[in-house]
Image: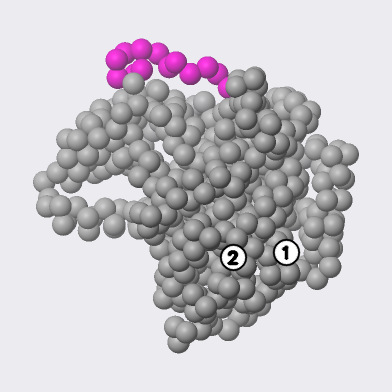
Amino acid sequence: MSALLIQHRENLSETKRKLLETCLLQGTAGAFKNPAKIGPRPKGEIAPLSLAQEQIWRREEMLPGGPPVHNESITIRVNKWLDAAVLQRSFAEIIRRHEIWRTNYKVTDGQPIQVVHEPSDGFPLRIVDLRAVSQAEQKIEMLKLYTDGVRQRFDLSDGPLLRAMLVILSDTDQRILVFAHLSILDGISVYQILPAELTSLYDAFVTGDKSPLAELPIQFADYAYWQRQWLNSQELTEQLTYWREQLGGELPVLQWPSDRPRSGFRAYHGATRSFALQAALRGGLKRFSRRQGVTLFTTLAASLSVLLYCYTRQVDILLGTPSLGARKQSDAQNLLGHFLNPVALRLNLEGDPSFREVLLHTREVLGNAVSHDDVPPEILAQNLGLSRSPLFTVAISLQPQTPETGAGWHVTSMDADSGGTIWDLYVAFIDTPDGVIGRAQYNTDFIKAATVTRTLDDLQILMKSVVDHPEQRISCLPSQLPSPEALS
């Protein structure tokens, strides 16, 4: 996206301005596209799974006894007393509005399809009152609630694919815990749509008013149907041409992280480590990114790629990031559902570039990748003859900020460890009013916890160094950053 468009965002239509801001928050502001409008699918047509949903479903089928890698945990902290009945009604209304949250899957003629159920008046909201126990006991019980909730498997063929509870710690400290299957939500769902709709509905219902939310013109199943038709479009051919050039030749195999021997079978066992950027970096990274004319996410991605270079000395680095995909279309911006598409960022660090050069290169690669992010990995593999799955083993993201939803509502995710992970290492940054924090998921079959801790520490050392001196060559950095092999 051009700098001119960003500078003159006030001249854009309201739809395009909101879209631009969403893309900038995600750090993935690609070119606007205007594909055919998504409309309701023809009456009587089955609702297929979206391509991303099908990939998730097939992975679940491969791991019937494995860890629940697709279970997601969401926490909404509320600093006031909540009426449980009103909250329950608010959830029921959200589920009525969004078909995907009352959907499960079945197989017909060998293919999985969506089964949308009729809405019900109630919602099984569990209430847990911990006001009578000490703070120490509350922490223990909260950890148990988180862990049990996120590790309880969902039955994709029966459902529901959503559970929630209200935990009362005090009259002014309450937690709404939501556990959901990845196939029915994404970051925009968690951080923007859900909190905005929940607070809006609660505030209306608690005063006796009706829902202030307009009816949705389409549903997620309509998008999934539209996406299947899009596979026959000329735009798919154009996007495949780009990816054929980007992923041509021998794809790099990242030699790190790997503390343990790898086998051909991926078990997806994982753990999560939380972290927070040092105080000196919290504002510094944003100011640095503005001075360099890039997004915060671009700086984070460039930093991680340079750290991997320092560890491996590989100059061909392949990272991944979940991209907004169809969220860039106005029809899909207000829908709950899983619209993410993981895209590859292939970065060339040959010639000992300065960090500033890496930064500008990352911006270009990222912009091009997001402009061609409608093609799911399995379609790429089929059309380009790629045998690798997944295409990349290290991924990075910047979670979108939570919008202003009224006093006392605050959302976080990944607060519990599901025991699984899709990638070897996934670093998810979260931009909060108090600074940048994050969660790192890692594959415990290959990587030790000490290695992840050291990596996150080294990443902050590197970021501090390049923010202060972006002109330094990347070959100058390894002296400050010992290899993870030093841990042994």
- At label 1, which amino acid type do we have? Asn
Apparent side of residue 145 relative to residue 221 in the rendered image (left or right): left
Residue 342's spot in the image, x, y percent? 65, 52
Nearest to the eye among marks 2 and 1: give it.
2
Return the residue nearer the eye: 296 or 478. Answer: 478
Is label 2 in a helix, a strand or a loop?
A: loop
Residue 160 position (above or below residue 116): below
Calculate the distance from the C-alpha at mark 2 to the C-alpha at mark 1: 17 Å
Total marks placed: 2
Specify the quadrant of the image occupied by residue 115: top right
Residue 449's spot in the image, x, y percent? 42, 73
For mark 2, what is the residue?
Answer: 472
Indicate yes or no whether the magenta region holds residue 206: yes
Identify which residue is drawn at 77% across, 40% down.
Answer: 228
Is label 1 in a helix, a strand or a loop?
A: strand
- At label 2, which amino acid type do we have? Gln
Please rate how many residues cluster around mark 2, counting C-alpha atoms within 10 Å: few if below 14, some from 14 to 19, many from 20: some
Highlighted magenta segment, given as a residue range: 204-219
Identify which residue is drawn at 80% across, 57% down.
Answer: 246
Helix, strand or loop for the magenta stretch, by majority: loop
Residue 12's spot in the image, x, y percent? 65, 22
Q: Is residue 129 visible?
A: no
Residue 43 position (above or below residue 244): above
